[in-house]
Image: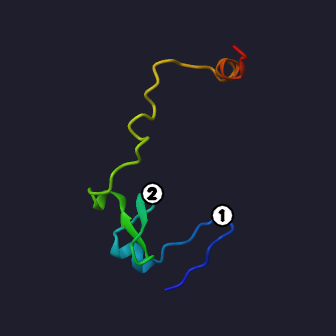
Amino acid sequence: MATTLTSKGQVTIPKQIRDALNLAPGSSVEFAVNSNGEVVINKADANPDIHPDRFDRSRGRADIKWRTDELMALLRSED
């Protein structure tokens, strides 16, 4: 089953695969490459053994509400 890669790096998952994984619009999927170099696609919530990104735990946790101009001034200061 072949499909074409767009200039944005996107492909359409064939209907047969979407049906087999019970994927609907808005479903999350996980991609991996196995030891044989084959691409594996799983429904994201179907495999609890996949660990979340190590940065997910810290996203959205800042207590300080920085404004962009204040942060840039701090980062660019010569102190």
| Mark 2 crowd level (few <14, some 14–19, many ≥20, 10 Å Cα) | few
Residue 41's x, y, as percent? 40, 69
Reading the image, the residue beneath label 2 is 26
Q: What residue type is labelled 2?
A: Gly
Reading the image, the residue beneath label 1 is 8
Nearer-N-terminus badge (1/2): 1
Q: Are marks 1 and 2 in contact (CB under 8 Å)?
A: no
Q: Distance between the residues labelled 1 and 2?
A: 19 Å
Q: In which quarter of the image is residue 56?
A: top left
Judge left or right: residue 49 versus residue 72.
left
Judge left or right: residue 47 versus residue 52.
left
- Assign the C terminus to one quadrant of the image: top right
**Residue shown at 62%/66% (left/top)?**
9
Residue lying furthest top in this view?
Answer: 79
| Mark 1 crowd level (few <14, some 14–19, many ≥20, 10 Å Cα) | few
Q: Which amino acid does label 1 sit on?
A: Lys
